[in-house]
Amino acid sequence: MGLTTRAVESAKAKEKPYKLADGHGLYLYVTAAGGKSWRANYQKAGVQKTRTYGRWPEMTLADARKAHGAAREIPKAMAAVAAAVPTFKSVAAEWLKIKLPALSNGKHQMQVENTLERFAYPVIGAMPIDSIPRTTLVGVVRAAQAGGKVETAHRVAGRITAVFDHAQDLGYIQQHGAAGLTRVLLPRKTKKPMASIPPEEAGALLRAIDDYDEPVTRLGLWLLAYTFVRVGELRGMRRDEFKEEGAIWVVPPMRVKGDEDKKLPHVVPMSRQARAIVKELERLTGETPLVLDSPARPGHALSENTFLFALYRLGYRGKMTAHGFRALASSVLNEHSGFDADVIERQLAHQEVDEVRAAYNRAQYLPKRRELMQWWADWLDQQRSAAGQPRASA
């Protein structure tokens, strides 16, 4: 049974302060001097605190009960609001539904999910998206960086920011503190570009290649120059990969760099010069399946480092690599050839827009790419001629 107005009025001072309970935690606090006030105790973060509503008689019993009732509703209202705001994990699940289908590589999809599962969810997964301090997010990405995993930490930071951006787009939050999280991380290691000579030095390089004493390697370097394919593709070149009497070389997907579920054959139109080199190699190696059959190990392709070490011996250590022919071709073709950038990109990036299958001649831009490859071979020969004698045969 609660207090009455008469009981409040008749409460007298005692030697020590005391309480008169009303109900639901509300009580009248009477001091040793006779002062009276309406109070209630509550818990915050595991610590008991006291809320004072007002003094009697300025605040009546009825007013104190109203104030206490309103205060008791605040935690319920806060809980309701918290329940209406989704957690980081639930927002991340919504974001993943949109993000993952756009990633055709299954391995990449798994990596995106796993970084959140491993680094973000254990700390912030259950927290409402609107109440996660930036300091907590900083702690998450720095923890991901522990052990030198800088690249992983940058990915975690990017995906956390994307989830917060998604929450903002959906109206769950008006703003957030997840932007620029990578600022607190060590910088990513940038891949050092493969060494490649500037275009004006191409003639001298080609003249040096002509002087290389081992003929299969020398011709292989010329094929790299004319086709600007990756070394792994060239090393495995087989005679049965040529179409149209050698005018087209189709590199099978197994030797093409890229995601396993997206790789297609790489179509390489062969210039007159490149076809002539293949004929020269036939005279050297016979009709072996491998075009670049190793003189040291017949029946095997030239080794991975054969071309690189050859360039070293020619004095180009740190100046040119086998992969550098791709960079050289890209630079010259984009700046001087006049061909459309899409045509150049298709030949450099190994991406066929059509379904190639066995119908290599349906590849998009193929007629223009034939012209491009012949232009490039002629440009190389012009540079070589300007630097010295024409290219030597085997």
Image (cartoon, rainbow, N blue to C red):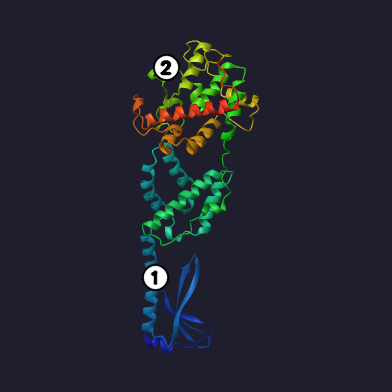
Q: Which residue is mark 1?
A: 74
- Asked whether the viewer can see residue 145, the reply is yes
Label 2 residue SS: helix
Q: Which of the two marks, 1 or 2, is nearer to us in this view? A: 2
In the depicted structure, whether residue 267 falls above or below residue 330: above
In the depicted structure, whether residue 325 falls above or below residue 21: above
Q: Which mark is residue 240?
A: 2
In space, the residues marked 1 and 2 are separated at their CA atoms by 79 Å
373 on left or right of 151? left
User: Where does residue 199 sit, x and y in percent of width and height?
Assistant: 56, 34
Marks 1 and 2 in Cβ contact (< 8 Å):
no
Looking at the image, tell me whether mark 1 or mark 2 is earlier in sequence order. Answer: 1
Query: Disc 1 residue type?
Result: Ile
| Residue closest to the eye, 102 or 109 | 102
In the depicted structure, whether residue 226 falls above or below residue 179: above
Name the quadrant of the C terminus: top right
Label 1 residue SS: helix
Residue lying at 45% horizontally and 27% vertically, measured from the top left? 374
Q: In the picture, residue 188 is in which quadrant?
A: top right
308 on left or right of 338? right
| Residue closest to the eye, 389 or 319 | 389
Q: Which mark is residue 170?
A: none
Residue lying at 54% horizontally and 30% vertically, measured from the top left? 325
| Residue closest to the eye, 341 or 390 | 390
- Asked whether the viewer can see residue 228, the reply is no
Mark 1 nearby-residue class (10 Å; few <14, some 14–19, many ≥20)? few
Residue lying at 45% horizontally and 41% vertically, measured from the top left? 111
63 on left or right of 384? left
User: Where does residue 264 sit, x and y in percent of width and height?
Assistant: 39, 29
User: Where does residue 168 sit, x and y in percent of width and height?
Assistant: 40, 58
Query: Disc 2 residue type?
Result: Asp
